[in-house]
Image (cartoon, helix red, strand yellow):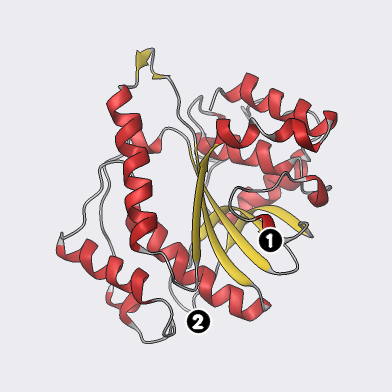
Amino acid sequence: MNLPRFLPGVPVDHVLVRLAKAGGKEIESGKFSSPESSAALAGNCFGWFVARPEKLPPLPGLAEAGTPELVDIEFCARFPWSGGRHPWLDAVVQTPTSLIGVESKRFEPFRDVKTVNLSAAYDRPVWGDNMRAFERMRDRLRAGAEAFVHLDAAQLVKHAFGLVTEGRRRGRRPVLFYLYAEPEARNDRPIPKDDILRHRDEISRFGAAVTGDEVLFQSVSYRNWIGSWHKSGDEVAAHGAAILGEFAP
C-alpha cells in the first residue's frame, strides 16, 4: 500500500482505522497518498494530538471553549434520524463547553467545481429556532441567490445541521470550524492571488450570513494558526514546523 510519510508522533494505526471507518475510501482509492491529499494534511495535523488533546493550541475565536479533552480525526456528526448519509468532518475537538467540528481544505477551493445538492430531507423542522440563518443559507443556495466559486457552502450547511444535533446530544455548544490551506501552486502552476483573496472573501461572506445561530462558525488558515504554536511549547512548535515542511499548506 502506497502511503504518504506520517509525521513523528502521529498514531499511524489509529489514523488508518479512522479513515477506514469514515467510508470515504481514502486509502483504497489512493487519494490519501496523493500529493494533493487534504486528508493527509488533516490526519497528520490533528492525529498528533489524539494522544495529547490538552496540547492542542487554541483555535482562533474559541478562547473561552476551555482545554480540549478529546481530539480525533474523521468525525461523524449525525442528523436526528437513522437512515441516509450523515456528514463526516475531518476532525473533532471536544472541550468541557464546546463540540468543535473541523472542516479542513487544501487544494479543493482552487480545484473542484462547487455544486449545491440539498435534498428535501434538510427541510425537516428539526434544527430548532436558532438555526434560521443556516436555513436561509440553505434556501438561498438552492435558489441560486447565493453562489460561491471556492467555498463549498452547501457542505458547510450540512455540517452545521449535523453539529447542532450532535452538540445537543453531548450537551456542548456546537462550533463549525473552517481550516484552510493557501497553497502557492498546483501542478507547478501558481494559484492566482485573486483566487486566494476571493476564497477569503467568500469565507467572510458565509460567516456574516450565519452569525448569531446556535452553531458558531469560525475560520483560519493553517499558516496563521500554526504561526501561533510557538506559544504552546517546543514540542508543539516542532510539530507545526513539520506540518509546514511536509505539506506547505
Using the numbered discs, state the Cα–Cα distance from disc 2 to disc 1 in whole angstroms: 28 Å
Q: Residue 64: which numbered mark, if any?
A: 1
Residue 126: name its quadrant.
bottom left
Q: What element carries label 1?
A: helix
In the rendered image, which residue does mark 2 sit on? Answer: 80
* Front residue of 56 and 159: 56
In this view, 157 is above or below 153: below
In this view, 204 is above or below 100: above
Percent x, y of residue 154? 33, 58
Mark 2 and mark 1 lie on one chain; the one further toward the N terminus is: 1
Percent x, y of residue 40? 59, 35
Name the image quarter holding the N terminus: top right
Residue 173: name its quadrant.
bottom right
* Front residue of 195 and 114: 195
Residue 223: name its quadrant.
top right
Q: Residues within 10 Å of mark 2 (few under 14, many from 20)?
A: some
Q: Is mark 2 on a helix, strand or loop?
A: loop
What residue is at 46 percent from the left and 63 percent from the top?
159
In this view, 102 is above or below 36: below
Q: Which of marks 2 and 1 is in front?
A: 1
What residue is at 38 percent from the left and 47 percent from the top?
203
Q: Residues within 10 Å of mark 1 (few under 14, many from 20)?
A: few
Q: In this view, does 2 lie to the left or right of 219?
A: right
